[in-house]
Image (spheres, rainbow, N blue to C red):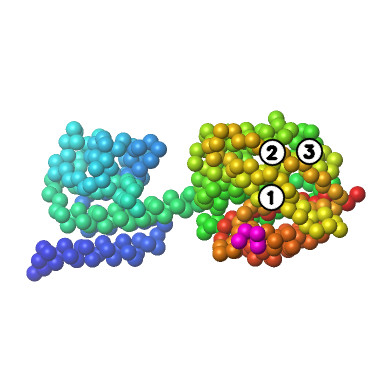
């Protein structure tokens, strides 16, 4: 005859095998469905449910259920701290109800179904609360410590799956956002040709670097290259807001320094903690001059036919978002003769670990050929070995057409 201890050990081996192998190959929805079935079978219970945490609302949301499907269909929510599930979320500890009463639960479906006893555990991932997993019986039941352990093992699997799903959704959202903000095609502008490259340096494929080109009512061309600190969805969101704000300020400011000053105030007030560098240039309607302002950003390179490539001698003002009280910002005006090439970039192009910055800048200046801008970008990326960078890279090259 098999002892109670051996039966419990066998149940633990079964649930560990399920959570470590079979379920790892399922997508999240199927995983939840299969896991709840297995939990009901192993614990010999009538109901099982997963409620995931809505962080913004501080509420638990019924996400998957067996025997309590109606609570999912109704979209049942309960605030953290309220009722049975809310108490588990608040304390982050298992809770056992040997007798379900109206004053202990707030979910009407539990009462309608006739649940008599409940066991619930928190779902955690990396030390953070993800939700609650609970099981119930239609007859009185005294749950044991081994029952609690079994349910905690299942909750661990739910936590891992939920975290993976959240990370995947964040990455997908960030990629979609970034792709919508970085131009896939640059505008065709009389008198100029342009080309660009963007290469992510982070495993997520998402960063805060961007470039932008837009025409202004005056006929001038606005050119932006920027870098928001960090990676992932948050950086992409901040980058999108900063990009849109700069476009708006460009419509009301004829001076790049003035536009960046307004943008700095916006970043300090609304994007606290987000350090951003930016280059904003306005190319005159006749394309003969460039008005340039730099907010903590690397100086661009100018390649003029018949002359050595040079780094533009422009003042580098503080980055956006430092919190300084309205630092003075400067605009540099340079000639942009026919055939000249203006190359702007983010620091990931020239910075290398264990190497002084000047070495990367020297390689960049030497790499820029007198050629169409597509060739310029391809040559620079190949020469600086920038196809698989350690940091994000944005590169934008503009050439004033001869004649």
Quadrant of the drawing holding the N terminus: bottom left
Give coordinates of residue 185: x percent, y percent.
71, 50
Q: CA distance from mark 3 to mark 2?
A: 19 Å
> Magenta stretch?
356-360
Tell which tag, 1 or 3, sits nearer the viewer: 1
Give coordinates of residue 338: x percent, y percent.
86, 50
179 or 44: nearer the eye? 179
Name the residue: 52% across, 59% down: 203
* Residue sticking out furthest to the bottom: 1
Name the residue: 73% across, 59% down: 365
The secondary structure type at the circle numbered 2 is loop
Q: Is residue 101 magenta?
A: no
Question: Which residue was labeled with disc 1?
Answer: 299
Question: Which residue was labeled with disc 2?
Answer: 330
- Mark 2 burial class by Cα count in 10 Å: few <14, some 14-19, many 20+: many
Name the residue: 14% across, 67% down: 6
Q: Is residue 357 magenta?
A: yes
Going by the image, does 66 lie left or right of 337?
left
The reply to whether callout 3 and callout 2 are in contact (CB within 8 Å) is no
Q: Kindly indicate the quadrant of the structure image that contains residue 98.
A: top left
Q: Which mark is residue 220?
A: 3
């Amino acid at each position: 005859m098999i002892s109670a201890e051996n039966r419990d050990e066998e149940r633990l081996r079964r649930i560990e095998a399920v959570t470590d192998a079979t379920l790892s190959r399922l997508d999240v929805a199927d995983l939840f469905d299969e896991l709840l079935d297995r939990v009901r079978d192993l614990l010999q219970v009538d109901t099982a449910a997963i409620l995931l945490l809505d962080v913004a609302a501080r509420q638990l949301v019924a996400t998957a259920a067996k025997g309590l499907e109606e609570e999912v269909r109704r979209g049942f929510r309960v605030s953290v701290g309220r009722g049975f599930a809310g108490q588990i979320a608040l304390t982050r500890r298992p809770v056992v109800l040997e007798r379900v009463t109206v004053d202990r639960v707030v979910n009407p479906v539990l009462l309608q179904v006739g649940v008599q006893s409940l066991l619930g555990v928190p779902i955690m991932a990396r030390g953070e609360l993800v939700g609650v997993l609970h099981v119930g019986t239609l007859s009185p039941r005294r749950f044991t410590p081994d029952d609690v352990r079994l349910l905690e093992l299942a909750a661990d699997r739910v936590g891992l799956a939920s975290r993976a799903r959240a990370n995947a959704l964040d990455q997908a959202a960030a990629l979609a956002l970034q792709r919508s903000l970085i131009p896939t095609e640059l505008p065709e502008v009389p008198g100029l040709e342009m080309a660009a490259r963007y290469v992510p340096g982070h495993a997520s494929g998402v960063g805060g670097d961007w470039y932008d080109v837009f025409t202004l009512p005056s006929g001038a061309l606005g050119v932006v290259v920027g870098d928001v600190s960090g990676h992932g969805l948050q950086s992409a969101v901040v980058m999108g807001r900063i990009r849109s704000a700069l476009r708006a300020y460009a419509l009301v400011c004829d001076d790049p320094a003035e536009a960046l000053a307004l943008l700095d105030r916006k970043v300090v007030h609304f994007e606290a903690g987000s350090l951003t560098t930016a280059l904003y240039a306005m190319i005159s309607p006749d394309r003969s001059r460039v008005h340039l302002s730099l907010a903590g950003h690397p100086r661009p390179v100018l390649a003029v036919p018949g002359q050595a490539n040079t780094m533009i001698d422009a003042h580098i003002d503080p980055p956006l978002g430092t919190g300084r009280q309205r630092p003075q910002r400067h605009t540099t005006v340079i000639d942009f003769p026919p055939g000249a090439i203006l190359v702007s970039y983010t620091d990931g192009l020239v910075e290398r670990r264990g190497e002084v910055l000047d070495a990367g800048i020297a390689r960049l200046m030497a790499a820029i050929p007198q050629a169409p801008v597509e060739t310029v970008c391809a040559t620079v990326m190949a020469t600086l070995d920038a196809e698989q960078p350690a940091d994000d890279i944005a590169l934008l090259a503009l050439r004033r057409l001869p004649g």
